[in-house]
Amino acid sequence: MAAVLRRGASFICLGSSQLLSGGCKHGRTCILPFFSSNNRNSSSSSKIKVDLDSSTGIAVVKFQNPPVNSMSLDFLTEFVISLEKLELDKSCRGVILTSAQPKIFSAGLDILEMYGKSPEHYAEFWKSVQDIWLKMYGYRKMTIAAINGFSPAGGCLVALSCDYRIMADNPRYRIGLNETQLGIVAPFWFKDTMVNTVGHRTAELSLQFGLMYSPSDALKIGLVDQLVPEENVLGTATETMTKWLAIPDHAREISKSMLRKPTVDRLLASRDADTKNFVNFVSRDSIQKSLGLYLTMLKERKE
Ligand SMILES: CC/C=C\C/C=C\CCCC/C=C/C(=O)SCCNC(=O)CCNC(=O)[C@H](O)C(C)(C)COP(=O)(O)OP(=O)(O)OC[C@H]1O[C@@H](n2cnc3c(N)ncnc32)[C@H](O)[C@@H]1OP(=O)(O)O
């Protein structure tokens, strides 16, 4: 199991053969954070960089999984651990998600995790996808997606799971749930998240065609809330977060929970069936063939 080593003022997760302390989820052992006395607490695992300013209560979580921030099992595990840790940290009131990679927010789920692997691997991977969505969609703290690049499929889902979305106004970028274009199907909770954001009719068109929207079209349908010049994405996200944090936390949090809990509960009530469904679906020869062709197409585009 890959080690998660957080340098500086942070925590360290190690494989079970290197037990240092107990009590961390995901089968990993964590040494919980130990912070320096200044107001900024930074930590950087291999794939997620966290920078918490405890004077403002705002944490910036940066995806750094080159080349395209695809969400592998390791990425998702580190991501959920980082969010859990921030949720428990009283000095953190809001989280901004963004990318350290130029031009890409996230390329979505790592297709290699769904291609040519065992059913056990598919199940483990899918549970980690469920975990990150459950964590994000039901997150107690305020979240903003600072979308500084392409954001297909799982990348779009992560953005949709935030409370507010600010996207770089670069006409080359695209965002959307494009699963059908890969020959796969966005599961019901991806669909619910989209419907809750853009409404039923727009979601019907969007999911069936696997539409990828330009920033201006994404703004028109309400898939994102605001467009800003690329260089201002993080600055605007920080300003916006400051405005949201003027609302008392408990009132905002309860309102969010009222709106989102029924959607979260639908998956919680059927997690195992959803996992079985995914494993059966993705193990089919026809689906493996579609994913293989898509991977080949991605590689050939470059030649
Ligand atoms: C009934 C239902 C029951 C169950 C459900 C069943 C199925 C479940 C569905 C699961 C939901 C799936 C969600 C997903 O997120 S699937 C992933 C979708 N993502 C994409 O389609 C994006 C693909 N990538 C791109 O379009 C481009 O890479 C991108 C992001 C625009 C960047 O372009 P560029 O900068 O030119 O970079 P390259 O294309 O050259 O890519 C570099 C390198 O990365 C590889 N790669 C890209 N994306 C992925 C990915 N998502 N996973 C793995 N690998 C990826 C690409 O192949 C290149 O690799 P190389 O080795 O050639 O360097």
Image: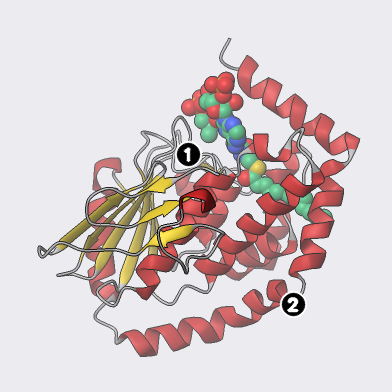
Residue 114 point in image, percent of width and height: 72, 40
Q: Residue visible at 34% across and 40% down?
A: 100
Left-right relation of 281 to 24 = right
Query: Residue 223, can we see it?
Result: no
Q: Is mark 2 on a helix, strand or loop?
A: loop
| N-terminal label among 2 and 1 | 1
Where residue 182 appears, x then y in whole percent?
73, 37
Judge left or right: residue 55 versus residue 131: left
In terms of image quadrants, where is residue 246?
bottom left
Tell me if residue 55 comes above or below residue 65 in the rendering: below
Where ligand 1 lies, by quadrant? Answer: top right
Q: Residue 156 location in percent, x, y?
A: 54, 51
In this picture, residue 284 sits left or right of residue 150 = right
In front here: 298 or 271?
A: 271
Look at 50% across and 66% down and name the residue there. Answer: 136
Residue named by callout 2: 269
- 82, above or below 7, in the image: below
Q: How is the image coloured?
A: secondary structure
Considering depth in this image, is 217 or 36 the residue closer to the camera? Answer: 36
Q: In which quarter of the image is the N terminus?
A: top right
**Mark 1 Cα-neighbour bin, 10 Å: few <14, some 14–19, many ≥20:** many
What is the quadrant of residue 36 in the picture?
Answer: bottom left
Tell me, for residue 69, which label it has, or none: 1
Report the number of numbered marks. Answer: 2
Write the residue at 80% across / 32% down. 290
- Residue 107 visible in image: yes
Q: What element carries label 1?
A: loop
Q: What residue type is labelled 2?
A: Ala
Q: Nearer the viewer, residue 71 or 78?
A: 78
